[in-house]
Structure formats: structure tokens, C-alpha cells
Image: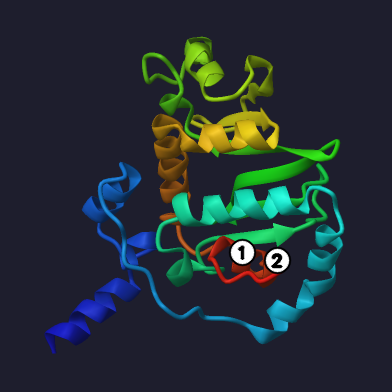
């Protein structure tokens, strides 16, 4: 009886709190724990087949290997329990038709999390994070952006820039080049900020972009890719 009540309560909880309590989420964000994920993935065969042509088109792009490598890192390091939450709480789109000509884009709830674009034969990234994680005084003051820290996160200072998207605590970080993207994701403070933003939006409820999920890209993010 108690188990049935607990299960019913979990069904009424939005977002990741159905699977992880706030302490588990906080510990993962800080890199203090490894979360136990599901072994099997819940999949839609119809949706798996829907974006095969787009995925194969992406594979013909000169940036394909770099894109898949970065996605693999993002899937393993930046999304909590990615197998259990795939599609329903996050999704990845291949060559999305939305403006900007992204090669791939990740979403959660109604929010874009991360995008990769072609930059010549290299790639560039857009990370969406909380502004307060990148200001010197943890405020929302645009004039307090910690530019010295941002420059240390990349190979060359000119590889990084930023924008202020609409939203009170949203910050867009643009990183150019495969090597600089990798370095940015390896910086503990930057990685924690990416995780914090992703937790915020995965906790807001079901993903609104489930219908654009590309399973072939997700295969690479989850270590199931074979191409």
C-alpha cells in the first residue's frame, strides 16, 4: 500500500523530481555523485525512422565526426539520467528547420539548451546557461560578466563571445572551434553551470519538442552509436 501511494505521488510531481530528489540533483550538478540510469531506452520505432534521411545527410557533412564527438560528451556529462529521461524530458534535433541553420539542437521543456553550427569545416556552439553563473558577483547585472574567466575557458580568447537572450537569468555563450568547445565543457565551473541550467528546465515538466527527437543522434549521445 505504501509503495502504491509513493508511486502515485511521484506521478503528480513534475520534472526530474519524479526520479531524483533535490539532493541527488545538487550532488550530480557538483560532480559529487554518479547517478544510476536505466539500462533500457523507451523508444518509438516510427520516430526512429522519421529522421533517418536527415541524419544521413548530416553524416555527409565535413563536421559530422566533430558533431558526434561533442554530442557524446554532452550526453554523458551534461544530462542527468539521459536514458531514463530521453525524449520526454530532453530531445535532440538533427538539421532542425528553425532559423539559424543549426546542425543539431538540444531542448528541454520549452527551452533550447545547446546547439552546434557549421563554421567553415569546423563547428561552433551556443550554450544556454544562467547569467548569474557567469557574473563576477553572481548577480544578473550584464556589466558584471566575468570575461576573464570566459577567456580562460577556450584555446584562444577570440573563440568565445556572448549574448543576452530574452529572459531574466539567461546567458548565451558562443564558442568557436572543436578544441575550444571541448575545453569549455571540461572547465569545472562551466560544466556545473551547464548542468544547473539543464536541471532548471528539465524540472519544468515534459519536453515540448518530443516529435523532433532524432534517435540516431541520441544513439551517439548515449553510447549506442555505430556509424
Towards the viewer: 171 or 49: 49
Which residue is rendered at x = 40% and y = 19% of the image? Answer: 139
Above/below status of 151 relative to 6: above
Count residues near mark 2 (Cα–Cα under 10 Å), then give few for <14, some for 14-19, many for 20+.
some
The N terminus: image quadrant: bottom left
Number of marks in picture: 2
Which residue is outermost to the bottom? Answer: 1
Label 1 secondary element: helix
Q: Earlier in the sequence, mark 2 or mark 1?
A: 2
Residue 211 showing in the rendered view: no
Which residue is rendered at x = 80% and y = 51% of the image? Answer: 98
The C terminus: image quadrant: bottom right
Towards the viewer: 35 or 108: 35
Marks 2 and 1, how far apart in space?
16 Å
Label 2 secondary element: helix
Residue 18 is situated, as x and y percent measured from the top left of the image, at 33, 67
Above/below status of 176 relative to 217: above
Which residue is rendered at x = 37% and y = 61% of the image? Answer: 16
- For the rendered model, the colour scheme is rainbow
Which residue is rendered at x = 71% and y = 84% of the image? Answer: 46
The numbered dot on residue 212 is 2
Residue 124 is situated, as x and y percent measured from the top left of the image, at 72, 36
Residue under circle 1? 220
Count residues near mark 1 (Cα–Cα under 10 Å), then give few for <14, some for 14-19, many for 20+.
many
Towards the viewer: 13 or 92: 92
Which residue is outermost to the left? Answer: 2
Above/below status of 42 relative to 141: below
Residue 22 is situated, as x and y percent measured from the top left of the image, at 25, 53
Is label 2 in contact with label 1 (beta carbons under 8 Å)? no
Amino acid at each position: 500500500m505504501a509503495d502504491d501511494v509513493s508511486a502515485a505521488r511521484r506521478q503528480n510531481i513534475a520534472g526530474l523530481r519524479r526520479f531524483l530528489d533535490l539532493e541527488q540533483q545538487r550532488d550530480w550538478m557538483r560532480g559529487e555523485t554518479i547517478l544510476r540510469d536505466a539500462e533500457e531506452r523507451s523508444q518509438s520505432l516510427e520516430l526512429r525512422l522519421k529522421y533517418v534521411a536527415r541524419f544521413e545527410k548530416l553524416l555527409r557533412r565535413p563536421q559530422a565526426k566533430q558533431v558526434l564527438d561533442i554530442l557524446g560528451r554532452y550526453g554523458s556529462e551534461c544530462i542527468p539520467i539521459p536514458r531514463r529521461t530521453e525524449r520526454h524530458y530532453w530531445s535532440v534535433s538533427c538539421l532542425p528547420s528553425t532559423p539559424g541553420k543549426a546542425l543539431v539542437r538540444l531542448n528541454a521543456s520549452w527551452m533550447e539548451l545547446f546547439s552546434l553550427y557549421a563554421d567553415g569545416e569546423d563547428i561552433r556552439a551556443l550554450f544556454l546557461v544562467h547569467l548569474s553563473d557567469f557574473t563576477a558577483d553572481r548577480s544578473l547585472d550584464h556589466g558584471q560578466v566575468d570575461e576573464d574567466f570566459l577567456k580562460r575557458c577556450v584555446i584562444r580568447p577570440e573563440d568565445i563571445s556572448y549574448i543576452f537572450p530574452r529572459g531574466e537569468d539567461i546567458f548565451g555563450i558562443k564558442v568557436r572551434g572543436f578544441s575550444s568547445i571541448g575545453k569549455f565543457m571540461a572547465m569545472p565551473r562551466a560544466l556545473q553551470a551547464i548542468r544547473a541550467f539543464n536541471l532548471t528546465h528539465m524540472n519544468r515538466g515534459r519536453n515540448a519538442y518530443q516529435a523532433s527527437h532524432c534517435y540516431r543522434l541520441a544513439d551517439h549521445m548515449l553510447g549506442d552509436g555505430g556509424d
